[in-house]
Amino acid sequence: MVTNDYIAMNGNKFSKVEEEFIKKHHKHDVKENQCSSSLVKHIKAPVHLVWSLVRRFDQPQKYKPFVGRCVLQGDLQIGSVREVNVKSGLPATTSKERLEYLDDDEHILSMKIVGGDHRLKNYSSIVTVHPEVIDGRPGSLVIESFVVDVPEGNTKDETCYFVEALIKCNLKSLADVSERLAVEDRTEPIERM
C-alpha cells in the first residue's frame, strides 16, 4: 500500500536502499497466527534530530499523539519497562512495554509489548533512522517494522491495517515535530561535490 511517501511491505516494492535496510535491520520471526509489515517515512530533518526523539523510550509522547503519559521504571537502558497511558479514541487505556535494543551509533530501537489492556499480543517493533539527502538538505529515512498476533475474530489483513494506521500516524507526527525543530535549527544545505 502506497500513501504519499509511505510504502507498506505487504507485496509492494521498496527502493533498493530501503529494501537493503529492511533486510539488514528488520528481521522478525513471524509465526502462522501473526502478521508483520514495514513502513517507511522520509523526513526533512537531519538524523541526529530525528533520532533524539525516537530514542527517548521514556518520552514517546514527544511525538506519538496517542500517548498521554509515560512512566519509566528504572533507568533508560535495555530491559527497561515503561507504562504508557493511551489517550481516548483507541481500544486501550494502558500499555506496558520493554526496551529490547537501543543502538545510538546505528540508530536502532526495538521494543516489545509485555502487558496492557489491549489486543496487541506478542507485539514487537524495530525502528531505524538512516541519513539521506532531501532537496539538497540533510534528511532522514525512518523505517518501522512490527510483528503481532492476529487476535481471535480478526484477519491478518485487518490486524495489519490497524497497526499500520497507528504507525503511519506516529511517523507523520514524528515528521511534523522533527521538521519543525529542523526549521528552528536552520540546518544548512549540503554542498554538492
Image: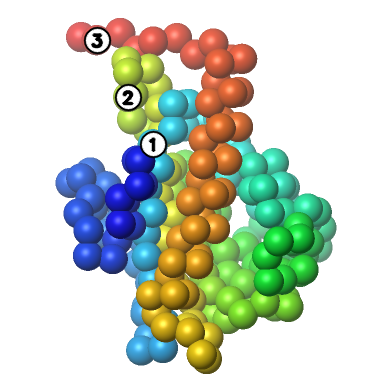
Residue annotated with mark 2:
133
- Give how far across and how far down residue 155 sits, in percent: 42, 83
Residue depicted at x 29% and y 61%: 9
Please tell me whether mark 3 sits on a helix, a strand or a loop: loop
Q: Nearer the viewer, residue 146 or 99?
A: 146
The answer to which image quadrant residue 92 occupies is bottom right
Residue depicted at x 81% and y 58%: 71
- Give how far across and how far down residue 137 sits, in percent: 38, 17
Q: Nearer the viewer, residue 20 or 118?
A: 118
Q: Amino acid at mark 1?
A: His
Mark 2–mark 3 distance (CA, rounded to whole Å): 10 Å
Mark 1–mark 2 distance (CA, rounded to whole Å): 10 Å
Mark 1–mark 3 distance (CA, rounded to whole Å): 20 Å
Please tell me whether mark 1 sits on a helix, a strand or a loop: strand
Residue depicted at x 24% and y 10%: 192
Residue annotated with mark 3:
192
The reply, left or right, for residue 69 in relation to residue 13 is right
The reply, left or right, for residue 168 in relation to residue 21 is right
Q: Is residue 123 visible?
A: yes
- Give how far across and how far down residue 32 sits, in percent: 36, 89
Q: Given contact means CB atoms under 8 Å apart, are the residues at marks 1 and 2 in contact? A: no
Quadrant containing the N terminus is bottom left
Quadrant containing the C terminus is top left
Q: How many marks?
A: 3
Q: Amino acid at mark 2?
A: Val
Q: Nearer the viewer, residue 51 or 13?
A: 13
Residue annotated with mark 1:
42
Which one is earlier in the sequence, the residue at label 2 or at label 3?
2
Q: Mark number for residue 108?
A: none
> From the viewer's perspective, is residue 22 above or below residue 56?
below
The answer to which image quadrant residue 52 occupies is top right
Q: Nearer the viewer, mark 1 or mark 2?
A: 1
